[in-house]
Image (tube, rainbow, N blue to C red):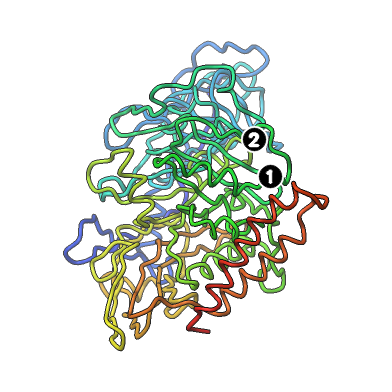
Amino acid sequence: MRPTRIRVHGTCEVCVQQRVPGRRGNGLGLVGPRHRGGRGARWQFAAALALVAWFAPPRDATAAAGGEFEIRAIDDQTKQPIAVRMHVKDAQGKPVKPAKLPFWHDHFVMPGKAVLELRPGRYTFEMERGPEYRIRTGHFEIRRGDADNRELVMQRFVDMKDEGWWSGDLHIHRPANEIELLMLGEDLHVAPVITWWNANNPWAATDIPHSPVTCFDRNRFYHVLAGEDERAGGALLYFNLRRPLPIAAAEKESPSSCEYLTLAREDPAVHVDVEKPFWWDMPAWIATGHVDSIGLCNNHMQRDKMLDNEAWGKPRDRIAFPAPHGNGLWSQAIYYQLLDCGLRIPPSAGSASGVLPNPVGYNRVYVHCGPTLTYDAWWKNLRAGQVVVTNGPLIRDPRLNGELPGHVFQADAGGNVQLQATLNLSIREPVDYLEVVKDGVVVHQVRLQDWADSGGRLPPVEFDRSGWMLVRAVTGNPKTYRFASTGPWYVEIGDRRISRKAAQFFFDWVYERARRIELPAGEQRDAVLKYHRAARDYWQQLLNEANAE
């Protein structure tokens, strides 16, 4: 028998980790203008390549009709096996599904090692472990009777937790008995598992755990009582409740999702997340005052494509927001208008792994908790807006005049505030610009070379009235909207700033949604409409208080 011929290589990953004076970081410097060339970029690429290798004499094959390939993942720093995610495909692009390992859509997670019994043919693979490790890719060929093994070293190029930032994914539909391996394979630290979802409630026939939070591997937490109410007006996600909400009998439109939202607030520990900004009932949910965060980095943004529609949500103008990035930009545009209304709602992230194709943790939110993570502190600081959301670039330790996202800068009426952002950045695919967004408008678009030359500082921004700002980085990925965004910082100079245009946008939205309610006249319809009337009054009040265009 002959050994399997395998070629393994790394992706061309440019890691920009510009050291900010006085900050933690292992700055590697900027490699080439716009990260598309230059000596540094060529060196990074060459260093990532491994040579074609012929392996030692093979072991006996166990599959007479094909061959056996054992693959192992080793951490570059610890030299120990680590869990990783694998995408293995045959020559026709069909994913390989190994036995006894968690598999979803086109990938599986392995605990440091997997033995694949494969038919003869050519195969490609990608090995990942969240966004803080380099991607390993390669190809190999299996011939009849082949048996071989390969050990791949996974290189961490960022350690966000060492900088005080801890990752979580707010939308997970995977089996609870697989979640520990999935979290390890994605290097994820907080994972509420959605186990009840409208008519699906396994807890109806079993005891609710006394302590639904599990800590393992010293600082990884998952909670098995997360839930989702997803109906005609969209989806709300519920976390940290002591028992599921009684939504099993809920119909498409009735009772109103606002009714369950109000009920959930009776539990002081609950965290409520609007799963996407464009859901039809979003303005009504916001009007209740019971929303804690909103899914800016949501599951319509997928690893290899966009879900290019708004499902049963408010559709975008496809001329203003064209594919493929339009849906992602529409989510941001809506979120920015909420901020323009003077509201302070932090962004969140969720992948919907188990329902949509994403791996666990593809869309993730990093929350600043300092050197030690506790479950309660993570949720507290998420609500405080000390966050970065991402599905690719890593904005590291962003500060505005030394303050974390979520901070409110204050000055007396007639005064002004001068602010300057500093941050580190690490990327695995090209990002041309860092963008500073002030009150919904990009006021600075900074090439990475210029940012690096300034020592990691972005141009200053001046406020002479209340408002907000954030920093984002968007890749040029042609298939999907891959980006990172800080949570907003806020400025309060005298009264809060309320945009008349933004308030009118949501006021009109409430009327448009009410006209879409599919219930006959009567008590049931009236019970639902009362929440939309309350929302109408809420946005009308903001219109009355508007003090900016």
Look at label 2 and name its amino acid.
Asn
Which secondary structure, mark 1?
strand
Q: CA distance from mark 1 to mark 2?
A: 8 Å
Q: Are marks 1 and 2 in contact (CB under 8 Å)?
A: yes
At x 37% / y 36%, what residue is drawn? 153
At x 48% / y 77%, what residue is drawn? 498
Q: Would you say residue 453 is visible in this rendering?
A: no
333 vs 56, left or right, is right
- Front in this rendered view, residue 436 or 21: 436
Residue on which the image places disc 2: 198
Q: Which mark is residue 124?
A: none
Residue 163 horizontal/vertical position (percent): 26, 50
Look at label 1 and name its amino acid.
Arg
Residue 270 horizontal/vertical position (percent): 44, 42
**Picture quadrant where residue 81 is located:** top left
Q: Would you say residue 513 is visible in this rendering?
A: yes
Residue 403 horizontal/vertical position (percent): 26, 65
Residue on which the image places disc 1: 231
Q: Residue furthest left?
A: 22
For residue 65, above or below residue 185: above
Q: Few, some or many C-alpha atoms within 10 Å of disc 2 (few <14, some 14-19, many ≥20)?
A: some
Residue 399 horizontal/vertical position (percent): 28, 65
Q: Residue furthest right?
A: 520
489 vs 36, left or right, is left
Which secondary structure, mark 2?
loop
At x 72% / y 65%, what residue is drawn? 512
